[in-house]
Amino acid sequence: GQGEPERAAPDVGIQLFQLPWVSIADECEQNIGPAGFSWVLTSPPQEHIVGDEWWVSYQPVSHQIESRLGTRDEFADMVQRCGDAGVDVIADAVINHMTGQDAPGVGWAGSSYEHYSYPGSFEFDDFHHCGLTPYDDIVDYGSREQVQTCELVNLADLDTSAPAVRARLGAYLDDLLSLGVAGFRIDAAKHMAADDVAAIVGRLPEGTRILNEVIRGPLEPIQPEEYTGSGEVFEFSYARDLAPQFESGLFSDPDLSDERPMHVPADRAIVFVDNHDTERGEAGLTYRDGDLYLLANVLMLADDYGTPVVYSGYAFSDRDAGPPAESDGTVTDSTCGAASAGDLVTDGERTCVQTWPGIVGMLDWRAVVGDAPRMPGVSAGDAYGFERDGRGVVAVNVGDEEIVLEIPTALPSGDYCDVVAASACDGADITVADGVASVTVPPRAAVAAHLGSRVP
Ligand code: LAG
Ligand code: CA
């Protein structure tokens, strides 16, 4: 007998943008754990300025874990419940800066603040005052000194070289670790010297996962490679290379070694189709692209380069608009029912990508293919596909006509079910014979099969 193939829980994350802690806990139990995601990335959990915009999260007032996304107790409960569902929590750590408000104010949890004065945490001398530009704002990304010691959009820039500042930020990260988080996204890592980041995270317990956000600017002096010593790095080149192929319909293999040009090494790379910043900026594919967005996620999840993080946000037409909220400002609890690509119409509606059948199917596909290498791909018109050696095949078609793609494969001969479509399997979509998978790919669709989807 053949039985079920071996499955290895894949290292795949999901970014749950501006989703409250109670909702994340429910999602872990209902959708995210069962689908096989291994971690969630939350929005920043610390006290922030008061406002309706999503980006208030990126203006810390103190490091109390109290925010419009939930209380400290709710955060702790989420970590516990996600853990029980087999899902780690990674928190977005905003440690480069505090607020960008010129006027004094009171934060979400009641802490008073002024620009450069956060009683009990940081005072004027704890900040960089770069003296290099008007208003100390970053103007020239060609200047390492400006990018790291001047202010990103007026945000008071912490002197992360100072021992007292490092200790205070370290205490915040320790506090989150005490609640059980597995690691951190280091927000705006490029705006801190790599040595400063290394010093701050270097004193955390071994095994703490660090995901550095360093937006690659090919002509800039500060490069993502500088940060691979202190953790993994979000590789912005990945989506920049992937998305244009969907627009042109002209697919080609990337460098299939672990060292793609302009990419950090595979074992350091976090890859994504979009995130909360790029869906408001440079991303070529977002939830607005419906089927094509799903197809891009399918190819990412099929790849053997890097650790993928799927993005789950909400529909918007105003780039500043926050998520739906109650009259007191707390973000409205929301969990996902069944949804699929292209269902979205209303501003504020959650994309719920974690419930899309094609995404869930590809997580299982990834569990089955394990570390089998990606083999050279084949193209035919608007279709493209490849094999993960002997374990699975995948194909996408971005055109308007059905295409039959022939993919060389070491899979055993037979008929296979597609794991991307939600529809019932009749085994007619994928047939393997004589070392070739014949894959019938409908217009603007993806099809994938693995060792475990063979029709008995
Ligand atoms: C990041 N990574 O490096 C975050 O991913 C990104 O979302 C953050 O910008 C940024 N760095 C700072 O953490 C977001 C918004 C900005 C917003 C900023 C601070 O994209 O638009 O700036 O958070 O809240 C806003 C206004 C600016 C204003 C600033 C200070 O848009 O015009 O100067 O607040 O008041
Ligand atoms: Ca800085």
Image (tube, rainbow, N blue to C red):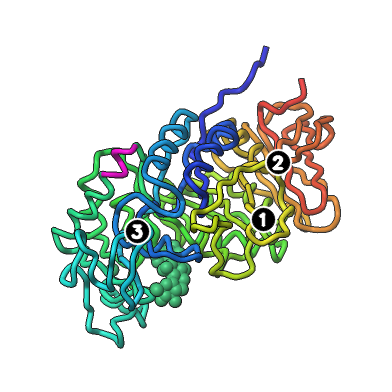
Q: Is residue 302 visible?
A: no
* Helix, strand or loop for the magenta stretch, by majority: helix
Quadrant into which the N terminus falls: top right
Q: Find disc 2 in the rendering and name its residue.
A: 338
Q: Earlier in the sequence, mark 2 or mark 1?
A: 1
Q: What x and y, as percent, mark residue 422?
A: 76, 38
Whole-percent x, y for residue 26 in the image: 54, 37
Q: Position of residue 421 (x, y in %)?
A: 75, 40
Instruction: State the SS at label 1.
Output: helix
Quarter of the image that includes the C terminus? top right
Instruction: Give the residue type at disc 1.
Output: Tyr
The amino acid at mark 3 is Val
Task: State which region is magenta.
Answer: 175-179
Residue furthest to the top in view is 1
Secondary structure under the numbered disc 3 in the rendered image:
loop
- State how many labels appear: 3
Three-letter amino acid code of the residue under disc 2? Ala
Name the quadrant containing residue 63: bottom left
Q: Quadrant of residue 119?
A: bottom left
Residue ID at (50%, 52%): 271
Tell me how far mark 3 sits from mark 2, CA to CA.
33 Å
Horizontal arrangement in the rendering, residue 19 relative to residue 140 (left or right): right
Q: Nearer the viewer, residue 320 or 365?
A: 320
Q: CA distance from mark 1 to mark 3?
A: 29 Å
Q: Is mark 3 within 8 Å of ligand 1?
A: yes
Q: Which residue is identified by label 3?
A: 94
Disc 2/disc 1 C-alpha distance (Å): 17 Å
First of labels 3, 2 by sequence position:
3
Q: Quadrant of ligand 1?
A: bottom left
Q: Is residue 170 visible?
A: yes
- The residue lying at 37 percent from left, 51 percent from top is 66
Q: Nearer the viewer, residue 85 or 218?
A: 85
